[in-house]
Image (spheres, rainbow, N blue to C red):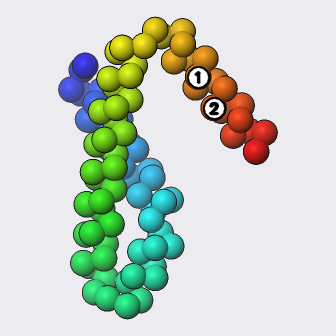
């Protein structure tokens, strides 16, 4: 796996998804605790989440046939569009 591609994808996903999934939980926690500590905790947890997701995705993409991965992804997008 190309480290430049890995770093680029990791960075884009990390920045793009952090406020999406943790915004409400962070907002509630920040209202009760120190804002910086809540943000650091949320960012660290999401860093671990993205690292696991990128690793598992990379392994699956290498082990499974490319056509199968494309089919599964297409079905997932179709399901999301229908929902």
Left or right, 9 with respect to 3, comes to right
Q: What element carries label 1?
A: helix
Q: How crowded is mark 1: few (under 14 residues within 10 Å), some or many (20 or more)?
A: few
Q: Which residue is drawn at 24% across and 78% down?
A: 37
Residues marked 2 and 1 touching at CB (< 8 Å): yes
**View extreme (right): residue:** 82
Mark sitting on residue 28: none
Tell me the quarter of the image containing the N terminus: top left
Q: How far apart are marks 2 and 1 (CA)?
A: 6 Å
Percent x, y for residue 6? 28, 30
- The quadrant holding residue 77 is top right
Left or right, 66 with respect to 2, comes to right
| Residue placed under numbered mark 2 in the picture | 76
Q: Can residue 8 be seen in this view?
A: no
| Residue placed under numbered mark 1 in the picture | 72
Percent x, y for residue 63? 36, 14
- As drawn, 76 above or below 28: above
Tell me the quarter of the image containing the C terminus: top right
Q: Which residue is drawn at 78% across and 39% down?
A: 82
Percent x, y for residue 11? 32, 43
**View extreme (left): residue:** 3
Q: Residues within 10 Å of mark 2 (few under 14, many from 20)?
A: few
Image mark count = 2
């Amino acid at each position: 796996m190309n480290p430049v591609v890995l770093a680029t994808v990791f960075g884009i996903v990390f920045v793009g998804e952090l406020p999406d999934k943790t915004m409400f939980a962070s907002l509630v926690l920040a209202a009760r605790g120190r804002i910086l500590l809540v943000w650091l905790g949320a960012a660290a947890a999401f860093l671990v989440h993205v690292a696991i997701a990128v690793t598992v995705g990379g392994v699956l993409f290498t082990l499974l046939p490319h056509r199968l991965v494309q089919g599964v992804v297409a079905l997932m997008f179709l399901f999301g569009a229908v929902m």
